[in-house]
Image: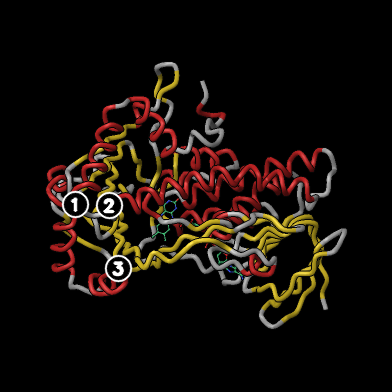
Amino acid sequence: MEQLDYDLIIVGGGAVGITLALQLQLQGYRIAIIESSALNYRLSDPERMIALSYGSKNHLQRIGAWSHLLDNHAGRIRHIDVFDSTEGSRIALHNHDLQTNNRSFADALGYVVDMSILNQELHTLAQKSGIQWFTQSRVLQVDTLATHIALQTDRNGVLQTMTTALVVGADGTHSAIRKMAGISTRGWDYNRFGLVCSVQVELGHFDVAYECFKSSGPLALLPMGDGRYSVVWAMEPREAAIIASLSPTLFLKKLNQALGMQVIEKTGRVMDVGARFCFPLELRIAKQFVAPRIALVGNAAHTIHPVAGQGMNLGLRDVEALANTLSVAHASQQNPGDATLLKTYADQRILDTLAVAGFTEAMVQGFSFEGALASQTRQWIMDRIHGSSSLKKLLIQHAAGVAQMSSQPHSMQS
Ligand SMILES: Cc1cc2nc3c(=O)[nH]c(=O)nc-3n(C[C@H](O)[C@H](O)[C@H](O)COP(=O)(O)OP(=O)(O)OC[C@H]3O[C@@H](n4cnc5c(N)ncnc54)[C@H](O)[C@@H]3O)c2cc1C
């Protein structure tokens, strides 16, 4: 049986796992990634678009992962309109309100990128940088010892033993590493699916993202780089299955009705739709983010409702925190699996995670209540926020991901 040793092993080669690998490799660690799939990237149809905050884009830029291709394809979110479609209340956020010393420092609050381009670019960079990949591999067993941790893996039927100081679980919502570490989760299924598709609108998007809250669930429009919108529409699973399989004409009719005149007045009617697909929506937060010689990042640590578009952004902030903690360890030749280091990482990440999950939950639940009192309360809250420049600035800072992490790339500072 082959035996291999690395400073760190990352299980899960999604965007969060690869970004961590790139950052740690730059710090001088010897890294391996174990990924269960064959990583056969191709531009997906239907497209899977994702909104990355200004802070996340800067993070990727700092480690050389924000490529020209990504930049050219990315849609810019320069304005966000939040609507309560039953009441007509509205909060409008603009990137020019995100200012320091009277200068706007963000060219956009967020960027809408194609997940397959992002993953492909990260993967190519990771291959060039000498990170060791084990694709089509699964971890069968984890043995935590005093000085290291041993993984038994199965790679296409070939059994291997791998040893390392620290295993990072970046293997998504149903993380096998989290389960092997004995870490349970809190949360629930929303009994909602997110229906996702790309659409063409009559007038164009003018860099505006829309969040429309309806009693059935939120409906978001994200401006894409080619002038179309990416739609994320939350609804009950049965309704999602029916709506996803409607003819394009009937689907467009439903979507135009759901958007309502508030949005259509600005974008024009939705004219054309690409392929549609559905994701189950769930909330799952790990009770601990670390165990002896194991740390969790990204969806393995927390899966939240996509309404606020924050899941990946949160995962990239995990990466930043863990990489910073391990950078100090590397400089002082401390073992990366040291329990005090892992505790530092977990302590740093819990507050941000609970704040984002709590805020997201408040949006999901707050707009689901029906009745006069609930709608009056919502209207009151939204009017207060819309009328308060300091509250709006706070929201803008969180949407842009600059409240939680250092966000100024060196090239943009002047
Ligand atoms: C409809 C929808 C819209 C969203 N929109 C946004 C948005 O606009 N903005 C935002 O910030 N977030 C958004 N999110 C959330 C975002 O997609 C996730 O938070 C993010 O993709 C998680 O990345 P990850 O790398 O942690 O996990 P994943 O992307 O799930 O990657 C996990 C990787 O681990 C691999 N793997 C799984 N099991 C194993 C195993 N046992 N062994 C080895 N490898 C394994 C998988 O193959 C995969 O490559 C959205 C989510 C949904 C559902």
Q: Outermost residue, front direction?
A: 373
Residue at 66%, 53% in the rendered image: 21
Does ligand 1 reach within 8 Å of label 3's beta carbon?
A: no
Q: Label 3 belongs to which residue?
A: 236
Total number of numbered discs in the rendering = 3
Q: Give whichever of discs 1 and 3 has the lower sequence position.
A: 1
- Which mark is on residue 269? none
Q: Label 1 belongs to which residue?
A: 201
Q: What whole-number distance in Å separates the C-alpha atoms at marks 1 and 2?
A: 7 Å
Residue 199: x percent and y percent? 24, 57
Whether tag 3 and tag 2 are in contact, CB under 8 A, the answer is: no
Above or below, 251 relative to 298: below
Q: Label 2 belongs to which residue?
A: 229
Q: Give whichever of discs 3 and 2 has the lower sequence position.
A: 2
Whether tag 1 and tag 2 are in contact, CB under 8 A, the answer is: yes
Residue at 28%, 58% in the rendered image: 217
Q: Give whichever of discs 1 and 2 has the lower sequence position.
A: 1
Identified by mark 2, the residue type is Tyr
Residue at 60%, 56% in the rendered image: 17
Residue 126: x percent and y percent? 63, 54
Q: Secondary structure at mark 3?
A: loop
